[in-house]
Structure formats: C-alpha cells, structure tokens
Image (cartoon, rainbow, N blue to C red):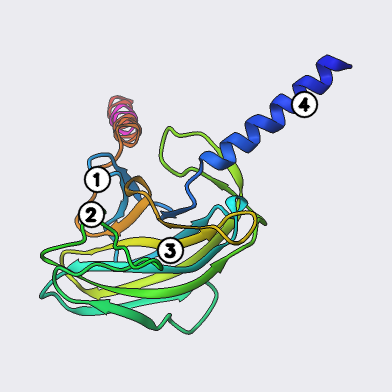
Amino acid sequence: MRKLISATVLALSLIATQAFAIPELQLYIPGASYVDGDDTWVISSNTFELWVIGNAEKGPISGVYLAAAYTTGESGEIKITPTGGSTPLATAFSGGDGTKPLLGDGSDLTPHAPWGAGTSWYSYLLGDFTSSADTIYDYTPGISGQGYGQINKYDVDITGYASGLHFDAYDHYESGNHSNYKYIFAPNSHDAENGANPVPEPGTVVLLGAGLLSLAIYGKRRRNS
C-alpha cells in the first residue's frame, strides 16, 4: 500500500513539475517549421492559424498582448481574427523604428529579437488567460512536458510586409495570493513568424528524403514492369 501511495505521489509530482516547466506564454503555428537558428516557428504563407498558449496553472495571466514586428519602411495590412469570429482585433499600440513594446511594469522586451533598430511594430490586446480547460505542451521540438491552460487561436491574414512579421506575446501573471506580479513574455524559443521559406527541421528533411526515394523506386519498378 505504501509503495502504491509513493508511486502515486511521484507521478503527481512529475506531472506538476512538467506543467511548471512549460512557459507562461508561448506561440505556435500548426504546419510551420521550427527553425533552430532562430528558435522560432516559421511559416512561409501569409495566411495561417496562430496559437497563443497561456500556462494558467502558474496563476492567472493578465493583460496579454500580441506584438507583430515588421521591417521599418515596409507597409501592408495585418488581420488577426479570433478563429470562428468575423471581427479582426484592433491595434492597441504601435511603435516606430527602434522602439520596443512595453510590459506592464514599464520594462521593454530587451533582449528579445528582433526588436530594436530597423524594426517597427503593432500590438493587439488579447485579454486575460485564466482557464485551465485545454491540454497544453511545451511546443519546442524535443522538449517534453504536459499541463493545462488556455489556447487562443487566431486566423492571420497578411498583405504586403515583404520581409514578413515576427510575433511575440507578453505581459504578467499573478501568483497564488494575487498580490505578487511577474512580468513575462514568450521566450525566444517560443515565438512565431512568417516570411521567407523556412529551413525544415532535420526530421522533416529525413521524411521528405524518404518519400522522394520511395517515389523514385516506385517509378523505376513501373518502368521495368
């Protein structure tokens, strides 16, 4: 009986540890490639679904914003619409060349790339992340961890902005007593962007190569039959 209780406690402890290892905020694009050099989910399309994931098990995450950085001098249109909705999010703030979005305590996203010289940005208010109804993971390839939180999904439609956009999520969560605040942003390894054709992960390259090899063998067999 003691062994069973110990095993149960250990399992629950492991689950809790995994949940707390998941970042408070992260971004993910289904169908995108994870580019190791940038530690970012990248997709070449100008229309895609963007997930903003909040790990509310650490505490309610309040006043979350989504920022979109673009190369200064470029222009276009950005539509970010809650999936299933019809009204795009309104721009909450914008910043000119070299400026950076500010967290709730007045600090900026330094040293977060690509904010800084040569970059301008818009931000959009997403609201609070308080639910633990969704199963969430650490979406970085090769990193394990499962927990419960809130996933907001948005349909993104971009015209113009030839160099693409870089997305980040930020602001703060409240600790258990709701009086201690930590100002946060999605780590560099949990950002998202669209732009030039991304370099696929090694695993993707292997699968693609295997598929092409299979097609070549199949074609050769057909010619020889």
Cα distance between the residues tagged 4 and 3: 35 Å
Cα distance between the residues tagged 4 and 1: 39 Å
Q: Spot the residue most to the right.
A: 1
Work out whether mark 4 precedes mark 2 in sequence or the reverse, and give the earlier one. 4
Cα distance between the residues tagged 2 and 1: 9 Å
Residue at image position (50%, 65%) is 153
**Residue 62 coordinates in the image, percent (x, y):** 52, 67
- Return the residue at label 3: 171
Cα distance between the residues tagged 3 and 2: 17 Å
Residue at image position (36%, 49%) is 187
Q: Nearer the viewer, residue 36 or 8?
A: 8
Q: Are marks 4 and 3 in contact (CB under 8 Å)?
A: no
Is 73 contained in the magenta span? no
Work out whether mark 2 precedes mark 1 in sequence or the reverse, and give the earlier one. 1
Kind of residue indicated by mark 1: Asp
- Return the residue at label 2: 113
Kind of residue indicated by mark 3: Asp
Q: Is residue 48 above or below residue 24?
A: below
Q: Which residues are magenta?
A: 213-217
- Return the residue at label 4: 8
Cα distance between the residues tagged 4 and 2: 42 Å
Q: Nearer the viewer, mark 4 or mark 1?
A: 4
Of helix, strand and loop, which one carries label 2? loop
The prevailing secondary structure element of the residues shown in magenta is helix
- Return the residue at label 1: 38
